[in-house]
Image (spheres, helix red, strand yellow):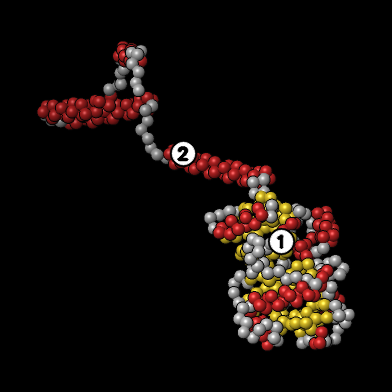
Amino acid sequence: MPANDGFLDQLPKELRAEVEKISKLLPEALPIFELVYQDGQNNGNSKRKALKTDVSGKLNDSNVIFELKDISCLSPVRKKLNMTISLDADFKPIIVFNKNNIAELIIKDLKDSVNYAVFLPFSEKKNLLYLYMRYQNPDGTNPDPVLLTMNKEVVLKQFKDASKVPPEATDFSECMEYMRKQAILTGFRISDPFSNSNGPPAFHVECHRGTKEGTLYFLPDHIIFGFKKPILTFDSNDIESITYSSITRLTFNVTLITKNQDKYEFSMIDQSEYAHIDEYVKRKQVKDKSMSDELKAKTTAKSQQAGEQSALKEATQQLKEQSSIKDIPLDSDDEEEDGNFEEGSSSDRSDEDSDSEDEHRDAEHDADDDNSEEDQQAQDQFEGPQDIPLIIDEDEEENDSDIIEADEDSGVEYH
């Protein structure tokens, strides 16, 4: 199956199971399913949102409980919107996202539809804050979550102007507290794990999922990765096990495995965050399968393969060294070669004798002959040692052997 199957995470479980079943039989079908999904995302957003919200006309200002104006919305759409908590025609609380008082998205039945809402810190800028909400449609489908970015100074000013907080308020926490109270009154809760001191502290780490860089939030009951689509949200109780891999001096990878055996890998996490993550998973009683038989088998196979490659490199190097040794001229102790060398020396002397005889015939005086003979004798004396054969006295060898045996039987021990 292709690696680019992230769109499967956005499908309902039953539909995803059917797509995976077909893709196993026909692997070439998976890219087609992805194209259909992307086409629906790109071309059907407006129509789909209109069907979900079922809103027409303008909002009644008298029904507005409170409002956040010009909030940057990152999901499900990227644009500036107003967020209001208000009452519908039946005087039931609803959340409305609108532009110019025209509703673009409505969440109804807040008590049943909003599964989780939380304030999250903006990792790069202290003056910004996320508001994250996960909800469910009446038909049971899970749409893209709502993600808003709030500028603390701007929102604080709005709340002061609307008399939602005291005029002298300077701490944004008062705005957060007001929104939390309004949410409770309308049927859902907004958690604030990074400000609430009760229980173990929440934390977040920077990491990658594939090529996407994002933030992984470890919350009391949830784990969230964002905030580039797809945004991933896990209930802590749904995480069955965790593995650590690709551990280096600076970073490591974490893979979360759900009870459905779905695996989600997050990479390039700073080593300084290991203790926090390890403490979190132990507190949640999540199994650490980093040393499971399956992973150890993979590690052993890799080590064996690396060992085989190392042995192959070593053998290749030895062959290269032997090849270079053949080219080095060495003195030979072969007796036959020594014999050839002696024969060559005798031939050289014969040539020199012939030259000496020619000189003798051409000489006019006996003194020249005497000088030539003296030269020949001197030459023979110079070359003579090359003609002396190496003679080994067998009796001496036996005597030497007896001496060695005597030493071995002497009974002296050396320590």
The image quadrant where one finds the C terminus is top left
Q: Is residue 340 left or right of residue 102?
A: left
The dot on residue 221 is 1
Q: Which residue is mark 2?
A: 322
The answer to whether residue 38 is visible is no
- Picture residue at 69% right of the left edge, 55% below the top: 284
Q: Position of residue 356 (x, y in %)?
A: 21, 29
- Picture residue at 74% right of the left edge, 73% below the top: 146
Camera-nearest residue between 57 and 401: 57
The dot on residue 397 is none
Q: Position of residue 49 (x, y in %)?
A: 82, 76
The kind of residue on which mark 2 rests is Gln
Camera-nearest residue between 317 and 340: 317
Q: Position of residue 256 (x, y in %)?
A: 69, 56
Q: Residues within 10 Å of mark 1 (few under 14, many from 20)?
A: few
Q: Secondary structure at mark 2?
A: helix
